[in-house]
Amino acid sequence: MDALLKAADSALRTLLVPARALRTCPTPSEPTGAASMADQDRQLSGALMRVNHVGEVCAQALYTAQALAARSGRKPNESLARQLEAAGQEETDHLAWTAERLHELGARPSLLNPLWYAGAFGLGLLAGRLGPGTSLGFVVETERQVEAHLAGHMDRLPATDQVSRAIVAQMKDDEARHARDAQRAGAIELPAPVKLLMRGAAKVMTTVAHRI
């Protein structure tokens, strides 16, 4: 029951309460203000950071669900749950940074965030129920795909948007480390069809979130 209440609290905080970062947002020493950006560049940055914000909403759901599964299975795995929650806390930093940047750019979060959260939570719970190795393998593949996605955004973000670029660069480094940590903790390689389905689902989410 405690684990369920903790998961419910995490969902409500993610969707209804502004996230608070434990780390300082990695902005450049002399950032260029959003107001000085061209309208077209500001709109593009806003759309891309909305997609990144959705990704962090999904990350909260995934890590929360996998930690819940680790604690509530036939053989509770507290060490795995703590590892997932530690990674989830860094994702909370990302959530706060992207939300703040959206506000600065005059852009809004996705209107479908509750839907994205629910879908990601279901996937995370399923992965967690399949055992520690599969759960960690899901983390590895998810973070690798997110890292590649963020690298693509680094290519697309306007050169004048130094703040968004610094945030995305730090997020990319964190995601790569999460994947390495999960790999060292005993992740198993997911089957190719599963990886393909994950890429397809991510493509749908990023395409829709870019606009809605």
Image: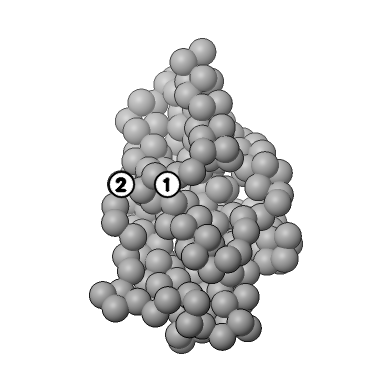
Vertical placement of residue 136 versus 27, above or below: above
Which amino acid type corresponds to the residue marked 2 in the rendered image? Leu
Asked whether the residues under the numbered discs 2 and 1 touch, taking CB atoms below 8 Å apart as contact, a structural biologist would say yes
* Residue 56 visible in image: yes
Residue in view at x 33 percent, y 69 percent: 27
Structural crowding at the residue carrying mark 1, measured as other residues with C-alpha within 10 Å and reported as few (<14), some (14–19) or many (≥20): many
Residue in view at x 55 percent, y 26 percent: 8
Structural crowding at the residue carrying mark 2, measured as other residues with C-alpha within 10 Å and reported as few (<14), some (14–19) or many (≥20): few
Vertical placement of residue 91 versus 207, above or below: above
Which amino acid type corresponds to the residue marked 1 in the rendered image? Thr
Residue in view at x 39 percent, y 79 percent: 32
Q: Disc 1 on helix, strand or loop?
A: helix
Vertical placement of residue 106 versus 131, above or below: below
Comparing 143 with 8, the one in front is 8
The residue wearing badge 2 is: 22
Q: Residue furthest left?
A: 29
The Cα atoms of the two marked residues, 2 and 1, are separated by 8 Å
Residue in view at x 40 percent, y 72 percent: 163
Comparing 136 with 188, the one in front is 136
* Residue 165 visible in image: no
Q: Which mark is residue 92?
A: 1
Instruction: Tell whether 107 sits left or right of 162.
Output: right
Q: Position of residue 143 (x, y in %)?
A: 47, 57
Q: Which mark is residue 1?
A: none
Q: What's the image's color scheme?
A: one colour
Whichever of callouts 2 and 1 sits on the residue coming sooner in the sequence is 2
Q: Quadrant of the C terminus?
A: bottom right
